[in-house]
């Protein structure tokens, strides 16, 4: 299972802070932090990364990505997706 590492990335900041910083609803942030979350929109991921000053590849953890090769492949894929999102903004 792949999960979003929101709690790790937030540090001492709160979901409320993140909601205020991104404009994403507090309930959406709580849902994304839950292991039951099934999807995330690119625009939401982009807002989270901007606020948390991270890349999409920094956001994920999962048992199938524990080895270095799997994690590096995931990060490379997420970088490509991030580049696609960034290049299509304007």
Image: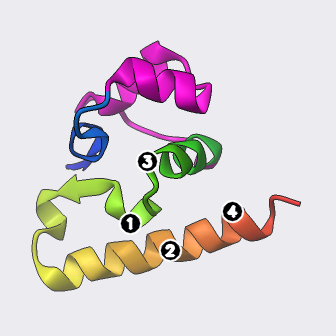
Q: Secondary structure at mark 2?
A: helix
Q: Secondary structure at mark 1?
A: helix
- Circles 1 and 4: CB atoms closer than 8 Å: no
Q: Residue at x 54, y 17 (%)?
A: 25
Q: Of tags 3 and 2, which is closer to the observer?
A: 3
- Circles 1 and 2: CB atoms closer than 8 Å: yes
Gap between marks 1 and 2 measured at Cα: 7 Å
| 41 versus 89 height, above or below | above
Earlier-in-chain disc, 3 versus 2: 3
Q: Secondary structure at mark 3?
A: helix
Q: Which mark is residue 85?
A: 4
Earlier-in-chain disc, 1 versus 4: 1
Category of crowding for the residue at label 4, using alpha-carbon neighbours closer than 10 angstroms: few (below 14), some (14–19), many (at least 20)? some
Q: Which residues are magenta?
A: 14-42
Q: Please state if 49 lies on the left or on the right of 75 as rendered.
A: right
Gap between marks 2 and 4 measured at Cα: 10 Å
Earlier-in-chain disc, 3 versus 1: 3
Q: What is the total number of numbered labels drawn onto the structure image?
A: 4
Earlier-in-chain disc, 1 versus 2: 1
Gap between marks 3 and 1 measured at Cα: 13 Å
Residue bearing mark 2? 79
Kindly indicate the quadrant of the structure image that contains residue 20: top right
| 46 versus 24 height, above or below | below
Q: Which mark is residue 57?
A: 1
Residue bearing mark 3? 52
Gap between marks 1 and 4 measured at Cα: 14 Å
Rendering coords of residue 74 (x, y %): 34, 72
Q: Of tags 4 and 3, which is closer to the observer?
A: 3
């Amino acid at each position: 299972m792949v999960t979003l590492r929101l709690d790790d990335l937030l540090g001492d900041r709160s979901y409320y802070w993140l909601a205020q910083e991104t404009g994403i609803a507090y309930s959406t942030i709580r849902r994304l932090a839950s292991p039951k979350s099934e999807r995330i929109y690119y625009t939401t991921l982009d807002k989270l990364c901007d606020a948390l000053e991270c890349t999409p590849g920094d956001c994920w953890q999962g048992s199938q990505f524990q080895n270095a090769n799997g994690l590096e492949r995931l990060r490379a894929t997420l970088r490509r997706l991030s580049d696609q999102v960034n290049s299509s903004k304007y």
